Image (spheres, helix red, strand yellow):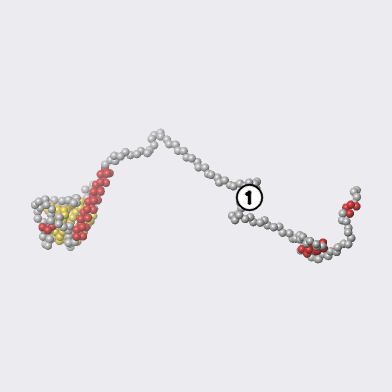
Amino acid sequence: MATEGQVEYESVLCVKPEVNVYRIPPRTSNRAIRAADWKLDAPDWTGRMRVTARGKVAYVKLEDKISGELFAQAPVEEYPGIAVETVSDSSRYFVLRIQDDNGRSAFIGIGFGDRGDAFDFNVALQDHFKWVKQEDEFTKQAQAPDPTPKLDLGFKEGQTITLNIGQSKKKERSRPQSSGGLGLLPPPPGGKLAPPPSSRSTNHNTKPPAGGNDSGCLLDLDSSNSNSGAPFNFTPSTTNTDLWGEFDSVSPK
């Protein structure tokens, strides 16, 4: 039942366009009901069936196909139960307990021409009451106290906590040191050193060939000098002059 201030909405669980209704003989014993005892070839009424739900109660409503006028309805509070029963000899027929507004009830037989329609009707009721069972379990769990003790992770009054956070030391990479005092660059990957650049001079010293004269050497030196514009004529002296004589003749003052 809905609590005060809440409104229960009616939901549709299943709709079948055609269902047959039969009058069934009163039950004289506890034996199972058989659809073969009914007049299956002459149904007493044919119409539409709608299965709805309002809260936890399902309603099987038999209505007119054209006008939708209600012919009979059966409130179902549990399934399987006395409100909807299956027969022993067929899966397409059921026994339905209908009730009027005054609370009077009667048992009738209903049947579907298609086996798939009967299956859908059965599943719609099963799914609804499976949901009802789950709702009841959730309600019980919410109302019942939890017997397991709760773990208290809070600090007590005056309780403190000390944390030791270590400082991480960065490791410096050691640089390779050379054996000498000067820092030398490492050799190239190929393992070969490039030769140092050679110094070039404007004058090339050429060693005179063995057995040559002095004039030829001087001429070669003069020809290699690019700064001199005029040729140099050298005449060998016939007299043998001592170049150190001048220094010997000078007397100290």
**Residue extending furthest front?**
211
Task: Give the mark count.
Answer: 1
- Identify residue type, mark 1: Leu
Residue nearest the viewer, comparing 30 with 106: 30
**Residue extending furthest bottom?**
230
Residue 52 visible to the viewer: no
**Horizontal and vertical percent for residue 46?**
15, 61
Residue 216 visible to the viewer: yes
**Horizontal and vertical percent for residue 71?**
15, 58
**Horizontal and vertical percent for residue 198?**
69, 57
The residue at which mark 1 appears reads as 184
Q: Give residue 195's quadrant in the image.
A: bottom right
Q: Residue at x 72, y 59 (%)?
A: 200
Looking at the image, residue 43 lies above or below residue 174 = below
Q: Residue at x 27, y 44 (%)?
A: 141
Looking at the image, residue 111 lies above or below residue 251 = below
In this rendering, position of residue 154 left or right of residue 232: left
Residue nearest the viewer, comparing 117 with 6: 117
In this rendering, position of residue 179 left or right of residue 238: left
Q: Residue at x 65, y 46 (%)?
A: 181
Q: Give residue 163's quadrant in the image.
A: top left
In this rendering, position of residue 199 left or right of residue 17: right
Looking at the image, residue 18 lies above or below residue 84 = below
Residue nearest the viewer, comparing 250 with 187: 187
**What secondary structure is marked by label 1?**
loop
Q: Residue at x 20, y 53 (%)?
A: 58
**Label 1: how many residues lie within 10 Å, few (<14), some (14-19) or many (20+)?**
few
**Horizontal and vertical percent for residue 32?**
13, 53
